[in-house]
Amino acid sequence: MEKCKILVVDDESRMRKLVRDFLVKQDFEVLEAGDGEAALDIFYEVKDLSLIILDVMMPKMDGWEVCREIRKESKIPIIMLTARGDERDELLGFELGVDEYISKPFSPKILVARVEAILRRTNSRGAEDILEAGGIEINKSAHIATIDGKPMELSYKEFELLTYFMENQGIALSREKILNSVWNYDYFGDARTIDTHVKKLRSKMGDKGEYIKTIWGMGYKFEV
């Protein structure tokens, strides 16, 4: 079986080696780039990348610029690494379609667990997994969402979140349940991550955003 290819982008060679060693142990193939321009060169050249781990602070081109360029071409999952714990950075990351956001210093084991969780969800889609409700259609295998026949521009996490809502129509879902199911790891943070994604998702759904109902003090419910 072919190994999943992961691109690790960081200007610190020591950090790249740390992440690479942990990923290689889990049987991933790792490509490395020391700056944003080199990262984009690899991204355009290697067509079967599975995931990108991207540092924010880099010379030549920072992580945000790299992310913007990649998102013009691809919905490939992106995990951002940053030395800053600034909430504005985190919100910018979600605006740009970042799937995970990890502050340095971090545990390499946790990073690998998150990589595996994302890839597990990406690779476990059935061939004919189609969901439809109220004019919204999701093709899980092709990773395409349409609304009244028009494609929706969703980030990886927004797509996963909408899929989860549609799979659990009419069921009240707590934020903890959503985090554990969609983010697929034990989340030690607050619920703003979900609220940010729901807000973005609703805006992209237009009038149909009202299908995602807020249950105050608990979470959300998808109901057509």
Image (cartoon, rainbow, N blue to C red):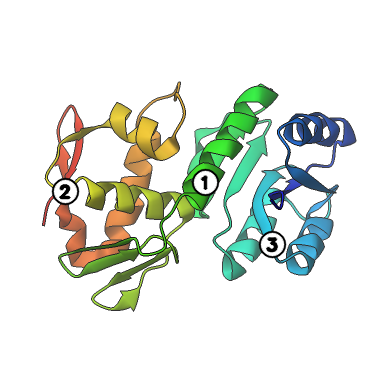
Secondary structure under tag 3 reads: loop
**Which residue is located at x 47 percent, y 49 percent?**
124
Numbered badge on residue 99: 1
Q: Residues within 10 Å of mark 1 (few under 14, many from 20)?
A: some
**Which residue is located at x 60 percent, y 25 percent?**
110
Q: Residue furthest right?
A: 13
Q: Quadrant of residue 189?
A: top left
Do the numbered discs 2 and 1 sit on residues whose CB atoms are within 8 Å? no
**Which residue is located at x 32 percent, y 52 percent?**
163
Q: Residues within 10 Å of mark 2 (few under 14, many from 20)?
A: some
- Quarter holding the C terminus is bottom left
Judge from the rendering whether residue 203 lies leftward or rightward of residue 3; answer left or right: left
Residue 58 can be seen in this image:
no
Q: Quadrant of residue 147?
A: bottom left
Secondary structure under tag 1 reads: loop
- The residue carrying mark 3 is 48
